Image (cartoon, rainbow, N blue to C red):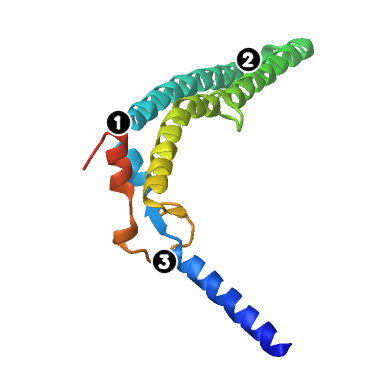
C-alpha cells in the first residue's frame, strides 16, 4: 500500500512539475507601450487642457472668496452686527461653492476621473486585446507588467513582448 501511494505521489509530482515547466511567462512594459501610442498622448493632452480650465474656475471662486474676506476685514469697523453676519455668510458660501466645485471636478468620482476613464478605456481595451491575441497565438500563460510595482527584481529582456504589442497595435518596431 505504501509503495502504491509513493508511486502515485511521484507521478502526481512529476505531472505538476511538467505542467509548470510548460507554462510560458512574458512581460510587457505598459509605460513604454503607452508612450508609443499617439492616442494616449492626445488623450493626456486633452485631459491636461480640461484640468487647467477647471482649475482656473476653482481658483476664480477661491479668489472671489478671498476678495470678499479682504473687503470685509477693511470695512468691519463700519458694519453693523447684522451686516457683519451677512458678509461672513457670503464669504463662507463662496468658500463652500469653491470647495464643492473642486470636489465635483477633481474628487474621487469627479468629472476628471470620469473623463479619464472615457478617454483611456478604448486605449486600454485595444492594448489588452493585442496582448490577448499575442498570448493566444504564442501560448503564453501569464503576462506581467514590468512598469507596475509587482516586485519584479529582474526579468530577462528575452521575455518582454512590449514591441510585439506595439506591432500588433500598428505602431511597429
Residue at x 21%, y 43% (from the top left corner): 173
Badge 2 element:
helix
Query: Cα distance, mark 1 to mark 3?
Result: 30 Å
Separation (CA) of disc 1 from disc 2? 55 Å
For marks 1 and 2 on the same chain, the one whose residue lies earlier in the sequence? 1
6 above or below 49?
Answer: below
Q: Tell which of 165 and 104 is nearer to you.
A: 165
| Residue 75 vertical placement versus 29 (above, below) | above
Q: Earlier in the sequence, mark 2 or mark 3?
A: 2
Image check: 12 left or right of 30? right
Q: Which of the image's four quarters has the N terminus? A: bottom right
Comparing labels 2 and 3, the label whose residue is closer to the camera: 3
Decide: few, some or many residues near mark 2? Use Cα within 10 Å; few <14, some 14-19, many ≥20. Answer: few
User: Where, by quadrant of the figure, is residue 52 drawn?
Assistant: top left
Q: Which residue is mark 2?
A: 75
The numbered disc on residue 77 is none
Q: CA distance from mark 2 to mark 3?
A: 64 Å
Residue 86 location in percent, x, y?
73, 12
Badge 1: few (under 14), some or many (20 or more) residues near its Cα, within 10 Å? few
What residue sits 64% from the left and 22% below the top?
100
Q: Position of residue 156 (x, y in %)?
A: 32, 64
Q: Position of residue 9 (x, y in %)?
A: 63, 79
What residue sits 38% from the left and 39% below the top? 130
Q: Are the two marked residues, 1 and 3, in contact with CB atoms closer than 8 angstroms?
A: no
| Front-most of residues 62 and 108 | 108
- In this figure, which residue is indicated by the disc labeled 3? 153
| Viewer-side residue, 133 vs 73 | 133
Q: Secondary structure at mark 3?
A: loop
What residue did someone put label 1 on?
A: 38
Q: Secondary structure at mark 1?
A: helix
Q: Residue at x 34, y 28 (%)?
A: 39
Q: How many numbered marks are there? A: 3
Amino acid at each position: 500500500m505504501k509503495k502504491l501511494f509513493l508511486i502515485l505521489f511521484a507521478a502526481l509530482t512529476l505531472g505538476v512539475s511538467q505542467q509548470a515547466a510548460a507554462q510560458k511567462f512574458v512581460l510587457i512594459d505598459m509605460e513604454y507601450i503607452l508612450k508609443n501610442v499617439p492616442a494616449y498622448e492626445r488623450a493626456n493632452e486633452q485631459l491636461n487642457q480640461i484640468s487647467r480650465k477647471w482649475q482656473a474656475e476653482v481658483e476664480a471662486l477661491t479668489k472671489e472668496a478671498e476678495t470678499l474676506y479682504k473687503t470685509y476685514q477693511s470695512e468691519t469697523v463700519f458694519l453693523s452686527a447684522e451686516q457683519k453676519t451677512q458678509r461672513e455668510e457670503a464669504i463662507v458660501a463662496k468658500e463652500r461653492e469653491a470647495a464643492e466645485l473642486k470636489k465635483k471636478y477633481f474628487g474621487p468620482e469627479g468629472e476628471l476621473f470620469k473623463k479619464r476613464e472615457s478617454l483611456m478605456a478604448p486605449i486600454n481595451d485595444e492594448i489588452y486585446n493585442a496582448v490577448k491575441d499575442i498570448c493566444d497565438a504564442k501560448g503564453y500563460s501569464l503576462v506581467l507588467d514590468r512598469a507596475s510595482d509587482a516586485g519584479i527584481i529582474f526579468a530577462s529582456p528575452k521575455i518582454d513582448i512590449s514591441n510585439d504589442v506595439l506591432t500588433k497595435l500598428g505602431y511597429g518596431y
